[in-house]
Amino acid sequence: MPDDGRRYELIDGMLIVSPAPAMPHQRVGFFLGMLLEEACPDDLVVFGTPVNVRFSLRSALEPDVVVARVEDSRGVRLEKTPLLLAEVLSPDSVLRDLNLKKAAYERFGIPSYWVVDPDLDRPSLRAYELDGGSYTEVAHVTGADTFRARKPFDLEIVPDRLVAKLRRR
């Protein structure tokens, strides 16, 4: 794909081209990755964008944050099932992240999927876990509420903290 600042993803052979993420999107993805990295056990590894996750020859995506096993993370792209994928919403990605990508991640057996809305007035985080082949929403926190993750490891996230620096004027 061309190196033109856009994100190129493939789901079941359908090419999805997205504009480069806005600054709040990038900041929240970066900070979420840092929080995960601080709590990450030694046998797991955290990646931020761009990391190519190849699910099949017809499906390759670039989630905003990925948690995978160290032994699965040695090649050019991640080809084994990661433990967590997180997407940060952008105005143009809401439907894609909450529907198309969520369905694809569910189908590919991703155990945990998080969606972060970086809205400065009301940031939020939704967490889904695979249960019997389907995602179940296990948390939906906003603002100062705390999400206490148990998978892929113990961690607490407060949506307000993800956007705190962006609120400063």
Image (spheres, grey):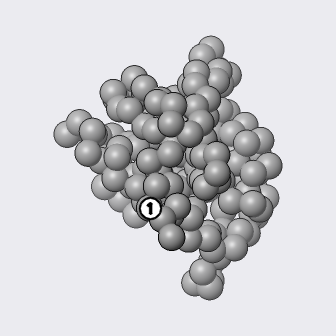
Is 47 left or right of 27, judged from the image as shown? left
Name, please, the residue furthest toward the front.
169
Name, please, the residue furthest toward the top.
132
Looking at the image, which residue is at 75% across and 60% down? Answer: 91
Q: State the image coordinates of residue 94 (x, y, percent, origin top left).
A: 75, 51
Name, please, the residue furthest toward the left.
42
Q: State the image coordinates of residue 119 (x, y, percent, origin top left).
A: 64, 53
Q: Nearer the viewer, residue 80 or 90?
A: 90
Q: Nearer the viewer, residue 112 or 58?
A: 112
Q: State the image coordinates of residue 35 (x, y, percent, origin top left).
A: 34, 46
Looking at the image, which residue is at 60% across and 17% down? Answer: 131
**Element on which disc 1 rests:** helix
Seen in the picture, residue 6 relative to 79 is either above or below; the reply is below
Q: Is residue 55 visible?
A: no
Looking at the image, which residue is at 38% across and 32% down? Answer: 156
Q: Which residue is mark 1?
A: 165
Q: State the image coordinates of residue 78 (x, y, percent, origin top left).
A: 44, 52
Mark 1 crowd level (few <14, some 14–19, many ≥20, 10 Å Cα): few
Residue 7, by quadrant, is: bottom right
